[in-house]
Amino acid sequence: MQTINHTDQEVIAAIIHKCDICFAGVVDEENKPYVLPMNFGFRDNVIYMHSAPEGRIIDILKNNNNVCVTFSTDHEMAFQHPEVACSYRMKSKSVIATGQVTFVEDMEEKREALHILMANYSDKVFKYSDPAVRNVKVWKIPVDNITCKEFGAPHEEYKLKRSVEELKNSNKSK
């Protein structure tokens, strides 16, 4: 099994859109990390999130708006030999993005960000009342840097061997 670095933006976006949560990591004034699971939306290389208008992470972001956002999907335990513990590996795909959070204050821009966020979870079109929009903190994170890895991908020789075996098996069943 191998690790593949993906750079194709369509592959990266597809992995992000497959996730239902992400993890937002920040560093507080005492240089201590703080990570929260968050709902999100992603469009045009911008991550959108929402939260309560106050709280620990908001206080941290007011002092240091740098954020690291991690997405992870397709988790599956795999092994090369069932009796060899160190041959086990968790297969997965992950994206790590960094950027700086700005808080959206404009009501229409907030609504658009909420549409982008909700589109990650539903095909419905939602309406947002003014009080609801005023009482939510909307985060906008233009991505400065993004990396994407696929862990536990089969080596090319294995994929070729598996394809040949699948062809043989499909021909036997005909």
Image (tube, rainbow, N blue to C red):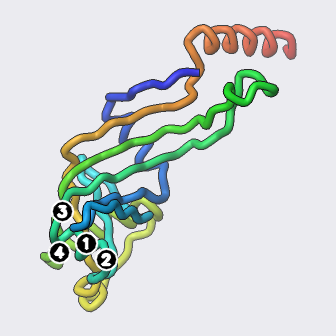
What amino acid is found at the position of numbered circle 3 in the picture?
Asn
Disc 3 target residue: 65
Mark 4 lies on a secondary structure that is helix
Residue nearest the observer in this picture, 93 or 88: 88
Mark 2 lies on a secondary structure that is helix
Asked where in the image residue 174 lies, by quadrant, the reply is: top right
User: Closer to us: mark 1 or mark 2?
Assistant: 2
Distance of label 3 from label 2 (alpha carbons) = 13 Å
Q: Residue furthest front?
A: 30
Disc 1 target residue: 138
The 10 Å Cα crowd at callout 4, few under 14, some 14 to 19, many 20 or more, is few
Q: Position of residue 14 (x, y in %)?
A: 42, 41
Residue nearest the observer in this picture, 58 or 131: 58
Asked where in the image residue 130 lies, by quadrant, the reply is: bottom left
What amino acid is found at the position of numbered circle 1 in the picture?
Val
User: Earlier along the polypeptide chain: callout 3 or callout 2?
Assistant: 2
User: Closer to us: mark 4 or mark 1?
Assistant: 1
Q: Is residue 86 left or right of residue 103?
A: right
User: Earlier along the polypeptide chain: callout 4 or callout 3?
Assistant: 3
User: Earlier along the polypeptide chain: callout 1 or callout 2?
Assistant: 2
